[in-house]
Image (tube, helix red, strand yellow):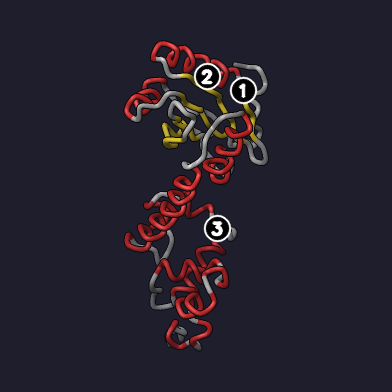
Amino acid sequence: MSEYKIGIKDLPETMRPREKLIEQGEASLDDSELLGILLGSGNRQENAVDLGKRLLRDHDNNLRYFMNASIEELMNNKGIGPAKAVSIKAAIELGRRVLTKQAAKRQIKSPEDVFNAVREMAADDMRFYDREHFRAMYLDRKGGLLAVDEISIGGLSSSIAHPREVFKTAVKRSAASVILIHNHPSGDPSPSAEDIELTRRMIEAGNIMGIEVLDHIIIGENNQYSLKGRGLI
């Protein structure tokens, strides 16, 4: 005998995720309910919310799994096909872009502005990555934030970044200056000798091109490290 599945439509209206969101707002839904709305449907054994609960349970209730996982990795979960995996990644990317566009309105005029912009635009996600991600923040001549671009993704303990990639985008966006950002998966933001050497190479390349490297921020688990603030550049 097959196991009986309670479908979303079998639930009282007050317990159905879509109706609950409409009546009470998105903040009233828990993670599994929001995920269930994204998934759209379940399978023969689970409704969409139950599928969301299982996915969360299988990954220690850590929503960052969905941010870090590739389409292929998401599809390795039972009940997740291409359409559901794409919906999850699209929703995460939309959220990231909202934060980016909000922060892009700010002006960078002081070291404190740099830290605040990095915290708002990068630190919340980068501090949990299990690989080193290297990003660059591009500014116009008045210190207005033009964009934040991901330059490269490294291995477990190394980031691959070349001045060519950083300054190619700077030229394309007509940036006057750039702020370098990368994370340390270990959680300790202290710079390595390689980090300092890379920063010096970037500064030299920027000087040749007339594009100033304002700072290099390293993101740890709970704090950030400014190479310029510590007098290392």
Three-letter code for the amino acid on which mark 1 is drawn: Leu
Three-letter code for the amino acid on which mark 2 is drawn: Thr
Disc on the earlier residue, 2 or 1: 2
Circle 1 residue: 227
Three-letter code for the amino acid on which mark 3 is drawn: His
Residue 99, position as x, y percentages in the image: 49, 49
**Residues at marks 2 and 1 touching, judged by CB atoms closer than 8 Å:** yes
Q: Secondary structure at mark 3?
A: loop
Q: Quadrant of the N terminus?
A: bottom left
Asked whether, in this view, residue 208 is left or right of residue 34, the answer is left
The residue mark sitting in front, 2 or 3, is 2
Viewer-proximal residue among 208 and 44: 208
Viewer-proximal residue among 216 and 81: 216
Circle 2 residue: 199
Q: For residue 44, which quarter of the picture?
A: bottom left
Residue 58, position as x, y percentages in the image: 54, 61
Name the residue: 44% across, 46% down.
Answer: 101
Circle 3 residue: 59
Name the residue: 49% across, 16% down.
Answer: 203
Neighbour tally class for label 2: few under 14, some 14-19, many 20 plus, Cα within 10 Å: many
Neighbour tally class for label 1: few under 14, some 14-19, many 20 plus, Cα within 10 Å: some
The residue mark sitting in front, 1 or 3, is 1
Disc on the earlier residue, 2 or 3: 3
